Amino acid sequence: MKKIIQIVLAVVVVFLAYVIYKQISTPIFFAKEKAAREAKVIDRIKDIRTAERSFKSKYNRFTGDFDSLINFVLNEQLEFERKIVDEDDSVAMAQLKKSGRKNSEKVLVNVIDTIFSPKKLTVEEVRELRYVPFTDNRTEFELEAGLITTESKVVIPVVECRIPYKMFLDTVRFRQEVINLIDDQENNFDNYGGIKFGSMERGNNEAGNWGDE
């Protein structure tokens, strides 16, 4: 009988040790995985924002359609003005002035070659902009664009791109942690329960909700 009691107690001790370990380790593991996944999602959503801002610079509006945005990046050009000669080069400037030409010229540059600088995206990476990391290219970011009228009666273009935490965090391994995170963001911080930039309700310069710089 004594032997049985000792075995039972040993099992209970091991079980309690496991429970305590899970209580301590799970938040640590979740925080690490959340940070790693968020970093990838934020990096991609920033590229989407860069593409949207470039689209707006050419068309004076944003687009809520990924096909249009990706086609713009892959197949269109932007016009830039550049100096012909270095203005500190007095000889070159004198020759330019003598020819009657201005020290500037218009050049066309492929969108993909300029807007993401210093980062360089491949064609395939641009085609995958719509997809949320860690979803095996099955889930797309939610993208909207349109026009709103401000309180001062000014019509401005707006855009919003978002993805809920539950779509890219591990809701199997960390189900309760994800539920708590979303509840905390939405109810305690009045924030979106995920990653987003922009707003369809007001102009906010396409600000992100991740402590955007």
Image (cartoon, helix red, strand yellow):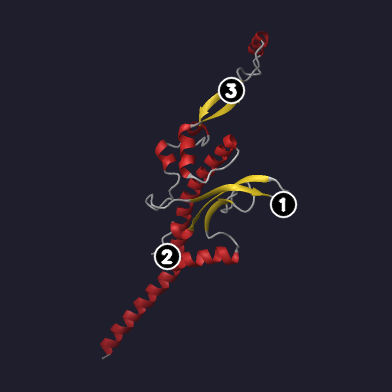
Question: Above or below — where is 105 with respect to 181?
Answer: above
Q: Nearer the viewer, residue 61 or 79?
A: 61
**Residue 106's disc number:** 3
Instruction: State left or right for residue 121 relative to residue 61.
Output: left
Reading the image, the residue beneath label 1 is: 151
Question: Above or below — where is 163 with respect to 86?
Answer: below
Q: Residue at x 51, y 64 (%)?
A: 181
- Indicate which disc, 2 or 1, sits on the residue closer to the N terminus: 1
x, y percentage for residue 139?
Answer: 41, 53
Per the image, label 2 sits on a secondary structure element best described as loop
Per the image, label 3 sits on a secondary structure element best described as strand
Q: Nearer the viewer, residue 43 or 204?
A: 204
**Residue 139's disc number:** none
Residue 115 seen in this snapshot: yes
Reading the image, the residue beneath label 2 is: 174
Question: Above or below — where is 129 with respect to 111?
Answer: below
- Indicate which disc, 1 or 3, sits on the residue closer to the N terminus: 3
**Looking at the image, is mark 2 or mark 1 nearer the viewer?**
1
The N terminus - image quarter: bottom left
Question: Above or below — where is 46 with respect to 73?
Answer: below
Per the image, label 1 sits on a secondary structure element best described as loop
> Looking at the picture, which amino acid does disc 2 mark?
Phe
> Looking at the picture, which amino acid does disc 1 mark?
Glu
**Looking at the image, is mark 2 or mark 3 nearer the viewer?**
3
